[in-house]
Image (spheres, rainbow, N blue to C red):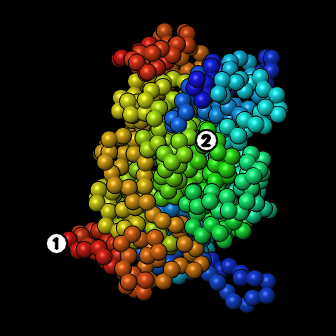
Amino acid sequence: MNLLKVQNLKVHFPVKRGPFSREREFVRAVDGVSFFVATGETVGLVGESGCGKTTLGRAVIKLIEPTDGRIFFNGENLAALDAETLRARRQKFQMIFQDPYGSLDSRMTVANIIGEALDIHRLAPAPAARRERIENLLNDVGLDPSHAQRYPHEFSGGQRQRIGIARALAVEPKLIVCDEPVSALDVSVQAQIINLLQDLQRARGLAYLFVAHDLAVVRHISQRILVMYLGRIVESGDAKEICRSPKHPYTQALISAVPVVDPDSKRQRIILAGDVPSPIHPPGGCPFHPRCPVAEARCKTEVPALREVAPGRHTACHLATVEK
Amino acid sequence: MPLLEIKNLQLDFGRGAKALRAVDGVSLRLEASETLCLVGESGSGKSVTALSVARLVPSPPAHYVGGEILVEGRDVLKMSKPELREIRGGVVSYVFQEPGASLNPVFRVGHQIKESLKLHRPTAATDTEVIRLLKLVGIPAPESRIKSYPHEMSGGMQQRVMIAMALASQPKLLIADEPTTALDVTIQAQIIELLRELKQRLGMAILLITHNLGIVGDLADRVAVMYAGQIVETDAARELLQRPLHPYTRALMHSVPSLTAHVERLTAIPGNVPRLGAFPGGCRFHPRCPIARSECANAIPELVEVEPQRWVRCPLWQT
């Protein structure tokens, strides 16, 4: 059974038009997204800023209240739970944030940052057991357990991200939503954190929803990838396959825009014109058509559905051909 | 005479016992219409080096201990204020990482570009010239865009305005400090393409500061890699990317995941980027280096020309 199953999820934020206007408008940050994450699997979620990937990541663990749609965790609909049950369930899904500086309370010691999660879920009431668990967690994420009484500012960016990971692991979750966990780190430190996340996944059978904009990192860590554009999934499928032969014109452009180190690579660069349109007034038809290099007349009027074009591969493009 | 020549630049933050050396003996040469990439992580001293070219690092706290920065043969470190003003914008222009923070939010972008023209080319300070510049950097409908405020533009468009402003004075050297780091990949590709086009069309030299080795392959003729305030390797871009020689450059390239090749596990560089004031003794990379020997901790290795035009600060580069 799938650990996490999301059906037609929508998150709309109201925006005011003007001081005298009664008209209500909405930013459709997430607009009808369905996907699943299996136990022990990593699903990558990529897209540019403003595409709704962070909102989606937060909405599936109910840090943001979804406007519509259903979220099943272990087969249980999270929307139907009362506040107390939901809090108990939260033990099973945790989050790692992008900014290792902003996401740790600077006035708490590392032991208390990690211990707070244990206290809330009453996982280690005895002081000795609590101390031992914190030390084990620090050990597991590659930090010196004797540093438990230190404060976040005494650590480097990479070490702080390890603290954030230890905090997420403290309650023994099944799913961790990782929101850009390495993009604020120095390049030479990123690989350490990626390797750590993979080691922990193997040892503990964790599932990750890995939200990031760096396609190479997402491809490396994920089994499957979801590509988002303007609040919708435009392509999904096997990570290596999507990067090898993207079917959606947006995915093609996204992959071709990634700078590559190899000076001899003879890639054809697709340079997209223009910017990501406003999610308040998304273009009609296919939301990508104004920037799409191959758009046709029907792309301006008909919204393409996400359909299977090859086994396990879904693409929301009228022009994608079905492989037999 | 090279357009820019930095000789053994040494820069401290603070004085006396509290002085922290941020740039330690950096030497660079940049010929007219050449593109040099300065690659490094946070704290490597790349931005401070680049800002020093027009002496934009506030001093104090910065304090130039030694070296020379020759722009067209004249030492920037010995210049008077009026001379500096002539260099800033006149010969050397800058584009920074955050276009939103660099533009003035209360003035229309056309006005801000015109301001640069008034200073450096007063006769050309007209709407026509502003529109020509906006067109040059690929802004659609420039006639109406000159009346826009920065907040009405996207990040990519703001960066184009910044580049237009930098080009207004017709500089010989454009210094771009992480110009695409704050932008999305598709927009980043647009800006890189624009820089490449401008370089060919205008024949100006570019000093590009970045932490992204991928961008190096797209733009640079030559590369200098910095680590903890020093240059550890400098080569022609192609050669460096194909066959990096310094252990740091090699490790950095191997630690980045690729879009095509499949690796089970990334080769991570252990430890952390050393902080300013906490640089290790001897070779500064030795605590994280996979091939370090005991003698690496003793003395800072020299930057040696190991092959024609290839300089490496590591005696063990062949291992």
Question: Do callouts 1 and 2 mark residues in contact (Cβ within 8 Å)?
Answer: no
In the rendered image, which quarter is residue B306 located in? Answer: top left
Give the residue type at disc 1. Lys
- Position above or below: A138 against A284: above
Chain of the residue on which disc 1 is drawn: A
Left-right relation of B160 to B111? left
Q: Which residue appears at 47% of the width and 38% of the height?
A: B220
Chain of the residue on which disc 2 is drawn: B
x and y percentages locating residue B50 in the rendered image: 64, 34
Left-right relation of A266 to A137? left
Location of the N terminus of chain B by quadrant is top right
Q: Which residue appears at 68% of the width and 46% of the height?
A: B169
- Position above or below: A54 against A128: below
- Position above or below: B186 against A132: below
Q: Tag 2: Cα neighbours inside 10 Å, few (<14), some, or many (≥20)?
A: many
Specify whether residue B159 is in view: yes
Q: Which residue appears at 38% of the width and 34% of the height?
A: B238
Q: Which residue appears at 76% of the width and 37% of the height?
A: B86
Say which residue label 1 marks: A324
